Amino acid sequence: METRTPVALIDDDKDLRRATAQTLELAGFSVSAYDGAKAALADLPADFAGPIVTDIRMPEIDGLQLFATLQGMDADLPVILMTGHGDIPMAVQAIQDGAYDFIAKPFAADRLVQSVRRASEKRRLVLENRMLRKAAEDAQENLPLIGQTPVMENLRNILRHIADTDVDVLVAGETGSGKEVVAQLLHQWSHRRRGNFVALNCGALPETVIESELFGHETGAFTGAQKRRTGRIEHASGGTLFLDEIESMPAATQVKMLRVLEMREITPLGTNEVRPVDLRVVAAAKIDLGDPSVRGDFREDLYYRLNVVTISIPPLRERRDDIPLLFSHFAARAAERFRRDVPPLSPDVRRHLASHTWPGNVRELSHYAERVVLGVEGGGTAAVPSQPTDATLPERLERYEAEIIRDALSANDGDVRRTIEALGIPRKTFYDKLQRHGINRGGYISRK
């Protein structure tokens, strides 16, 4: 299914807006039309995939102010200005400031279409180059799937074999085993890598929210729906949708998800409009959905629809020969992140690596490596980090407190609730200490 290039159209003239949108839609574009700059800025993401077409003369925020704001969001976002005769000098100045094009009114439909096509191609190339650069920067993030054991070599071969086939995939594995890494690799190694990789943890959202997150909603669809929201499924069209902990999906949502998988279409909340979607679904579960005794309320027909290809990730305890290699990688990454040297392996650390069962799998091993590098872990025994000999007792306590907070953040993926529970301190005290020690919580949020 061909995906139409998106275009944002902003014009306060209702008739002209409708006519211009129709021209662009007939030319093969997907148009999001807005009656003013304020509405557009509230809805458009910073990484909008197409060009912006806007009138200059509009109330509240005019086209030039909108252009300046969009440049601040993304200097490479192509903006085409529609101008009256008297606005041409301003439009020429805007071109010099970085606007993509201006079109004087009245204009021929073909003039607009050709400009939008060229701008769309420019935007596509810019985003593709960004994606390639990011893929190169993130290459190290794929390494948690490394391993020299036969089971890991076989897993990598399977992923490469099926990545470009577009089949839906069910990934089975214990907590922390790398299910999202597998989903990301299936996306990156496929032709869908130009589209979005959209992840949703079905167990992290209440039943009242998950349908809106998945399917989106129109303005006024329910109390609090003050503006239109594109759902995760529609946002993943052209790319990959990753549904983690799918066994936690509410029963009512399962029925709707089954229809998405069968028909490849959605109906957002608050509308009867049916929208086609082109996506691959990768679902992950911590339990064996094929076993009726543990499947519980999960629908059997949804399981069979998802189970086109099933990939099982072995727990870390079943590939113990990979543990030293993984630990070495995580320790080197932690040393770079915390600007410290990788410490030599103590007997306690070696013993812990060899004997621990790693119920948290790769994620637990990663956090353990970080604690070893920070000097607060030595095979299960906490150790006070080395302090300058000339430091006063209050200074030493301050530094040790900062290390404990960093350790707790690392162990809990930067999650505030879990971290303050582990530390046993009030939320306000936690934030005060972050500020006092200059700790950036964002650096501890898991990217896996």
Image (cartoon, rainbow, N blue to C red):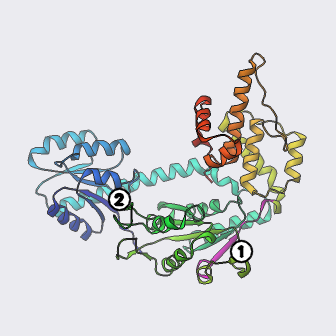
**In the image, 115: left or right of 6?**
left
Residue 401 percent location from the top left of the image? 71, 32
Q: Residue at x 71, y 34 (%)?
A: 403
Identity, as a three-letter code, of the amino acid under mark 1:
Asp
Residue 60 percent location from the top left of the image? 21, 46
* Closest to the observer, 11 or 107: 11
Does residue 329 appear in this view? no
| Earlier-in-chain disc, 2 versus 1 | 2
SS class, disc 1: loop
Q: Residue at x 23, y 41 (%)?
A: 94
Identity, as a three-letter code, of the amino acid under mark 2:
Gln
Q: Residue at x 75, y 57 (%)?
A: 361
Distance CA(mark 2)–CA(mark 1): 40 Å
* Closest to the observer, 205 or 285: 205
Q: Residues within 10 Å of mark 1 (few under 14, many from 20)?
A: some
**In the image, 122: left or right of 429?**
left
Does residue 71 appear in this view? yes
> Where is 190 relative to 69, above or below?
below
> Where is 99 relative to 404, above or below?
below
Mark identifier at residue 240: none
What's drawn in magenta, residue-wise?
304-316
Q: Which residue is mark 1?
A: 288
Q: Which residue is mark 2?
A: 226
> Where is 355 relative to 285, above or below?
above
Residue 264 percent location from the top left of the image? 46, 77
Instruction: Tell which tag, 2 or 1, sits nearer the viewer.
Output: 2
Q: Residue at x 51, y 78 (%)?
A: 261
340 falls in the magenta region? no
